[in-house]
Image (cartoon, helix red, strand yellow):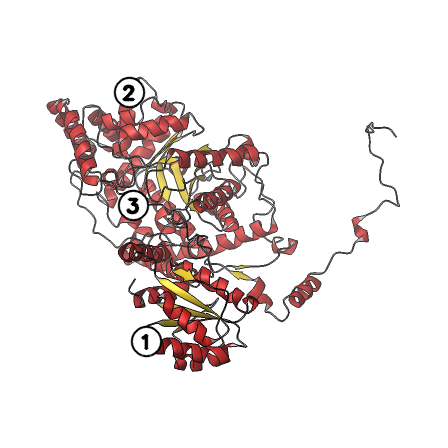
Amino acid sequence: MSNQTPDRQPEAGPDAPSFAEFPATDYNAWREAAEAALKGGSFEKKLITKTHEGIALQPMYRAEDVAELPHMGSLPGFAPFVRGTDVLGYKHQPWEVSQELKDATPEAFNQALRADLERGQTAVNMRLDLATLLGEDADAAEPGLVGKDGLSISCLKDLTEALDGVDLEQTPIIIQAGASGLPLLSMVLAMLEKQGRSAKKLRGCIGSDPLGELAGSGRLPRSLKGAYEDMAQLTRWAAAEAPGLRTVVIRSYPYHDGGSNAVQELALSLATGVEYLRELQARGVTVDQAAPRILFAFSLGSNLFMEIAKLRAARMLWAKIVAAFGGSEDAQKMHIHTRTSGWNKTLYDPDVNMLRATTEAFSGVLGGCDSLHIGPKDEIARVPSDFSRRVARNTHTVLREEAGLTRAVDPAGGSWYVENLTDTLARKTWELFREVEKQGGVAKALSAGFPQQQIAAVSDQRAKGYAQRRDIFVGTNMYPNPTDDPLTPEILDHTALQQQRTAKLKAFRQGVNADARQSALDKLAKATPDDRVKAAVAAAAAGATLSDLCSALATGETSDPLLTPVTIKRGAEPFENLRRRSEEFAKRTGSLPKVFLANMGPIPQHKARADFSRGFLQVGAFEVIGNDGFETTDQAVRAAIDSGAGAVVICSTDKTYPDLVPDLAKGLKAAKPDITVLVAGYPADHVEAFKAAGVDDFIHIRANCYELLNKLQNKMGV
């Protein structure tokens, strides 16, 4: 037999096999088979999944589900850009590895940045502390704000130290600058001038997001009108002088981290974009100047396909919006930065955070993000360690090099599930977007509390799902590891840090020509709109601090009133608090709160419910005392009382419970009146009788785990 491959394969003859020989299965036949497999269970309840977005996910999607979708047939690089803004996708340019660094001082930030740029990071992503975002110098900031959640920058020397050794002509930079980007950009430009480098080669985003800042903190360091004036000047300047630099950032983070669903996150982000376009147009910036200068920054949650659809729907809807403003096809392209979620990360079983971040990053890449931050496993508790930063950076490399996600353009495209979900999500987003528009835009909606109320409702819905364990935080509200070594939140000495930063700022001021600095600030305060950027750069170069620049730019302004921000929290916090309470109880008393399992009968009779109860109770870090089972109720009562446990769980079967539970409950209460008696399972026909006998509650799959454990802790003095 020859091993040579023929130059040409033989053509199929009339007797060649054909797929037509295998008749396609009818959907109704499949559904009948599925319903039969459910053995009487409801198809709708068992196989159709309801999401927090109000979307009903089908168990299977077919060609019919995408046949009428308007975006089907579109190609990568062409409007409406649902499949990406580049015809070659990542084959042309992979996403930027844009890891945030949380170091508080310029020296520490620079050390981490230079190390990471040598090891796979491709862009600077400067996360600022709260004092800097509020335009406050370190020596005058409110207590606790310096170094809070990011880098402290007060003057040009700080910025220069933070970026020492980094060539911004070659490396993109992202600075999400809060209400106004002009003070930070002026420092960057002053630094480049001193280095003899060109601003024209700047890439990335040094952008303001006053509405995002308002949503997250409830206040701005200056008026919203003034922030828009700066935004307009920066955008006009960048269009002419730094075409690769974006000057506006729209962050979905405050909404996502408040527990919003994807519809709310998208709708509020897009409505923010519309408001910014209108404000910029009103100040003489054209849509073709403005739209390409906007960076959308989205969080990536754990629902893989929803997040893929979210980015695809975002591009499609933004193209529609910009087109309605009269923007060119090129201006309709959305530039997307993404970061893995902070909302769903946990202090307990923290290694799971790496797994969560990996799936989130995977969805961001398949969704077509342009840059990405993958959160290190410990970022919610402290400045990430070298090890956790390395793992996060290498996750990018694995996705790019080993998973091969750059080898196909829009690999998710064409999936009936993804395409249908993209369309459904887009339509729901558009409905909410129009509702925000009816209220007069995002600023007015925030003032009226509309987004806050909408997000709080979804957040409460999520909390209920986790409390009842319909939704899962692996290692926290389900599958806890009793020997876990949780993350310990870093207690930053803000007072010492502020003193250190104050001393450095004082030394900087002593080297500044006070007259030249004041003269430059006076010119900035009086500068015409066209000269404002140039005047700000001159002031920064003359030694003006961040607060100096913000004050000069805000000359004559009055601050807008405060409003109630979106409540930002992590979803796992209630369950983490349960664990923490038990651990603190152990420190006080020498042992964790104890629960005794009254396992009745042979092992096969009680094991399933005993195992379930153990996992249920370990969520609250209870010490669970097990055994191989008791033959009589008297034996079980004696053993339970001798254990010193504050609660007992009776574990057996529904069939045996009527004979066991009343005697056990009465015996336990007689021996120790304050003991809590629980039954594993929920024998509906006997619940009231068991309660009358002394049973306090029931552990079962539909129980509210959080409420039951919280109540148990309260009763046991935890």
**CA separation in Å, label 3 and label 1:** 54 Å
Location of residue 297 (image quadrant): top left
Left or right placement of residue 351 versus residue 224 in this view: right
Identify the residue at the far top of this view.
Answer: 196
Name the kind of residue labelled 2 in the image. Glu
**CA separation in Å, label 1 and label 2:** 79 Å
**Tag 1 or tag 3, which sits nearer the N-term?**
3
Q: Which numbered circle lies on residue 673?
A: 1
Q: Which residue is found at the position 46% from the left and 77% from the top?
A: 661
Q: Which residue is found at the position 17% from the left and 45% from the top?
A: 558
Left or right placement of residue 132 versus residue 96 in this view: left
Q: Is 264 or 155 nearer to us in this picture?
A: 155
Name the kind of residue labelled 1 in the image. Pro
Residue 388 appears in the figure: yes
Above or below, 42 against 93 in this view is below
| Residue under numbered circle 2 | 193
Residue 469 appears in the figure: no
Q: Secondary structure at mark 2?
A: helix
| Residue under numbered circle 3 | 213
